Amino acid sequence: MTKRSFDQFFKNPRHWREDLVAVGGDFSVDRLLYAYTHGIFPWSEDPIRWYCLDPRAIFDIHRVHFSKTVLRKVRQKKFRISFNEAFPIVMQACSYREKDNTWITPGFIDGYLELHKKGWAHSVEVWNAENVLVGGVYGVAIGKFFAGESMFSFESDAGKIGLFHLFAKLKESNFELFDTQQLNHVTWQLGAYEIPKLSYLDRLEHSIQEMVPWVIPPSHD
């Protein structure tokens, strides 16, 4: 589809008052990129529902609040941290819910894997001493904008340790905006906060002026 077709498919979040801006479509790379660069994200698969929330939850990349326990574990370096080493496995792990249904269904995984192959989606992996994946995060990076999608922990604080290293790389790369969509208990404890939708869209527009994939800085450990 062309940009004009997407303009017709999605309601313009700047002028549309509802959170739900479209229903249907697919998880193609072009559609996902259009959505993210216009403040829109998918939240279900059957059918695909696309949202732009008001208010919107974000992080200040330089003011994330990690607990003393998490910071101590980071200093101890008991975990190996990698980037983009196991993107599909991270998504699968994020989709696991012991009791509840998950929104990360097969269509999401296939669509975001294609986004990852094109360089727009990234994962952080946390491995224990036995080289078992025990935590991780994934999201979408465009220009100086990062959309955090989901996080998992199979060992205490493993996901937050991955998030710590993600924020460190984003700061190193001078990122300007981290979208976490909606507040929950975990993101609120970490320092996420809400801003009006129009303020979010203004920040987004500024952060994607140079619409390029993220090249993650190498580690120096």
Image (tube, rainbow, N blue to C red):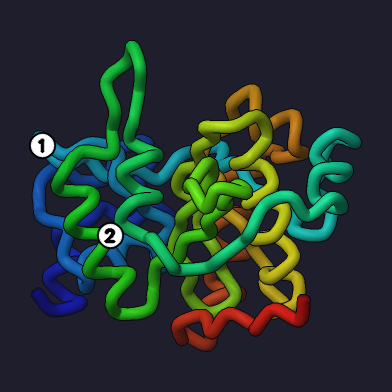
Give the residue type that dot 1 points to: Pro
For marks 1 and 2 on the same chain, the one whose residue lies earlier in the sequence = 1
Estimate the x, y position of residue 218 in percent, counting from the top left: 65, 83
- Above/below status of 149 relative to 55: below
Q: Residue at x 39, y 73 (%)?
A: 120
Q: Is residue 97 left or right of residue 22?
A: right
Q: Which residue is mark 2?
A: 112
| Residue 15 seen anywhere in this rendered image of the structure | no
Q: Residue at x 47, y 60 (%)?
A: 123
Q: Which residue is mark 1?
A: 47
Q: Is residue 146 left or right of residue 91?
A: right
Can you tell which quarter of the image residue 48 is in? top left
Please name whichever residue, 79 or 84, is drawn nearer the observer in this view of the structure. 79
Q: Quadrant of the N terminus?
A: bottom left
| Residue 212 seen anywhere in this rendered image of the structure | yes
Q: What is the number of callouts on the image?
A: 2
**Classed neighbour count for the residue bearing mark 1: other residues with Cα under 10 Å, few (<14), some (14–19), many (≥20):** few
- Label 2 element class: helix
Q: How far apart, in angstroms, are the residues tagged by discs 1 and 2?
A: 17 Å
Numbered disc in front, either 1 or 2: 2
Give the residue type that dot 2 points to: Tyr
- Above/below status of 149 relative to 194: below
Q: Quadrant of the C terminus?
A: bottom right
Q: Is residue 152 left or right of residue 216?
A: left
Q: Residue at x 52, y 88 (%)?
A: 210
Estimate the x, y position of residue 106 in percent, counting from the top left: 16, 44
Estimate the x, y position of residue 97 in percent, counting from the top left: 35, 23
- Label 1 element class: loop
Please name whichever residue, 125 or 41, is drawn nearer the observer in this view of the structure. 125
Check the image and name the residue furthest to the front.
130
Q: Residue at x 57, y 52 (%)?
A: 126
